[in-house]
């Protein structure tokens, strides 16, 4: 379980997300509470269920971004789902239960990757030895990367050339060569299994895969293929790792972690809320989806192909803009299961300026990196960035408020010309974006908006 303190989690989120302090605090505290709970005696622990969070705020202010970053920070099993993707049980489409199954899959993958990492050294060693042994058995014509193995059928027209026999080489020395990658581009013949074809039974249901359902009923086809040592090593490391790892234990630990540490982020929850008085049409199914979500948030047991999982301790974070539908339009039972409400703030010009400059993955930096590929050294003057931020706020006020996404659209039109012209056929050229340039490029559109502002 992660050991980060709430302050550390917030500090980490701060590197990518500007403002929204309350939302950051709420998720940080919720996570720390999971850790605190894990330290309690089991009789106490059983009674403490996580307090689910409902994030509410306009579009493009960082709801999804907070969840996405959170997932990367804490190494807990995490899935992000969109409420609108689900359909009521009994209808064609993805049922809500699949979010629990997805969480288990994610969790098992997480545990497996950890175990893989643990056995990596041993597995690599074994793999290299296997390659060495294969090379020893191979007669390798020198000066050519083609190898012919003894098992190879040689047709009448081909004369087998035996130039150097690797068996003469000290096997220790050969192992060293293999480890150092000297033979990486040599070809060896290995048996590879062909993945069985995926067959979709029910359209739109991605989990339905015949070979999955019938387990080992269809034997996997094996076939001899010539591949490079490098590729063979990857295959062998995989095989060896699987041999070294107790998969049953991995599945068990995966289930345990999903159960105790799992986080499910349900995005666009407002889209399945329904405004009062519209009790027909697709709304009926929206309420149905809410009712379907309920038992999982309440706590129930779900059967997955890896075993049973209790959903009682999974942390749910729901988010939505709640522009049209209100939180109160969700069915009361569901509302009640999200006791922590955080509202995200609308972003201002000052926030936009910070978003342009501060995050580790700031878009100004991304654009500069992209253009650097075509020999352009892109720089922004401070005043230019302030002007972009001001225009973003203005356009959000006068047009649809799309939050920080506005910065992306503005940046695209601002750099449109440069992006199109740049082709790298020149020495490195410096391009400085000034306030003047921003106004010249964006001015005409902005002025238009400025006028509309006063026309009532
Ligand atoms: N506070 C912020 N700090 C930094 N970047 C932000 C912030 N808010 C939004 N962004 C950026 O804007 C884009 C959209 O944000 P995000 O996906 O989080 O919106 P959202 O709140 O989930 O909106 P929606 O309700 O439409 O789903 C992302 O690229 C994100 O990086
Ligand atoms: Mg979102």
Image (cartoon, helix red, strand yellow):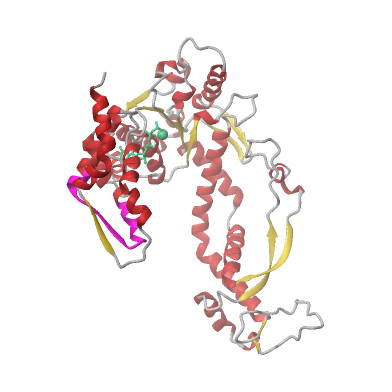
Q: Which residues are magenta?
A: 365-385
Q: Position of residue 56 (x, y in %)?
A: 36, 26
- The image quadrant that residue 48 belongs to is top left
Ligand 2: give its quadrant: top left
- Please report the residue visible at 28 percent of the width from the left and 34 percent of the height from the top: 20
- Say if residue 295 shows up in the picture: yes
Q: Position of residue 438 (x, y in %)?
A: 24, 45
Q: Residue furthest left?
A: 383
Q: Position of residue 339 (x, y in %)?
A: 38, 22
* 382 lies above or below 377: above
Q: Residue furthest right?
A: 156
Q: Position of residue 435 (x, y in %)?
A: 19, 46
- Quadrant (top left, top right, bottom left, bottom right) of the C terminus: top left
Q: Is residue 388 left or right of residue 333?
A: left
* 424 lies above or below 208: below
* 41 lies above or below 181: above
- The image quadrant that residue 2 belongs to is top left
Q: Is residue 224 left or right of residue 251?
A: right
Is 41 in front, or is 260?
260
Is 298 in front, or is 265?
265
Q: Is residue 383 magenta?
A: yes
Q: Is residue 410 magenta?
A: no
- Please report the residue visible at 60 percent of the width from the left and 76 percent of the height from the top: 186
Q: Is residue 361 left or right of residue 257?
A: left
The count of marks equals 0
């Amino acid at each position: 379980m992660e050991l980060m303190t709430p302050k550390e989690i917030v500090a980490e989120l701060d590197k990518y997300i500007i403002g929204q302090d309350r939302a950051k605090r709420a998720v940080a505290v919720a996570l720390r509470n999971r850790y605190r709970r894990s330290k309690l005696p089991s009789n106490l622990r059983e009674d403490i269920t996580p307090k689910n969070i409902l994030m509410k705020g306009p579009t493009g202010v960082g709801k999804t971004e907070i969840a996405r970053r959170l997932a990367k920070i804490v190494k807990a099993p995490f899935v992000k789902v969109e409420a609108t993707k689900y359909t009521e049980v009994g209808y064609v489409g993805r049922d809500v239960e699949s979010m629990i199954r997805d969480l288990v899959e994610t969790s098992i993958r997480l545990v497996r990757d950890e175990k893989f990492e643990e056995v990596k050294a041993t597995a690599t060693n074994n793999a290299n030895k296997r390659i060495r042994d294969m090379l020893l058995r191979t007669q390798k014509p020198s000066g050519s990367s083609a190898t012919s193995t003894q098992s190879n059928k040689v047709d009448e027209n081909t004369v087998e050339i035996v130039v150097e026999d690797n068996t003469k080489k000290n096997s220790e020395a050969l192992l060293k060569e293999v480890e150092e990658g000297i033979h990486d581009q040599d070809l060896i013949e290995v048996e590879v299994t062909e993945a069985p074809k995926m067959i979709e039974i029910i359209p739109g249901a991605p989990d339905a895969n015949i070979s999955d359902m019938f387990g080992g009923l269809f034997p996997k086809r094996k076939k001899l293929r010539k591949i490079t040592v490098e590729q063979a090593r990857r295959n062998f490391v995989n095989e060896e790792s699987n041999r070294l790892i107790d998969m049953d234990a991995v599945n068990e630990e995966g289930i345990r972690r999903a159960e105790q540490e799992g986080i499910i982020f349900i995005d666009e929850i407002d889209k399945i809320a329904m405004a009062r008085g519209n009790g027909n049409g697709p709304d009926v199914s929206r309420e149905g989806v809410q009712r379907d979500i309920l038992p999982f948030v309440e706590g129930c047991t779900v059967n997955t192909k890896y075993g049973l999982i209790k959903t009682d301790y999974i942390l749910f974070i729901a988010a939505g803009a709640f522009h049209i539908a209100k939180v109160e339009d969700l069915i009361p039972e569901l509302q009640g299961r999200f006791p922590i409400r955080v509202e995200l703030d609308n972003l201002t010009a000052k926030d936009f300026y910070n978003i342009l400059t501060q995050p580790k993955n700031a878009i100004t930096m991304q654009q500069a990196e992209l253009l650097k590929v075509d020999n352009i050294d892109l720089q922004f003057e401070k005043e230019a960035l302030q002007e972009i931020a001001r225009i973003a706020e203005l356009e959000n006020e006068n047009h649809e408020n799309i939050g920080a996404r506005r910065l992306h659209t503005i940046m695209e039109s601002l750099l449109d010309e440069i992006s199109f012209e740049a082709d790298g056929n020149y020495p490195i050229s410096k391009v400085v974006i000034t306030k003047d340039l921003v106004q010249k490029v964006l001015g005409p559109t902005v002025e238009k908006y400025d006028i509309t502002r006063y026309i009532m």
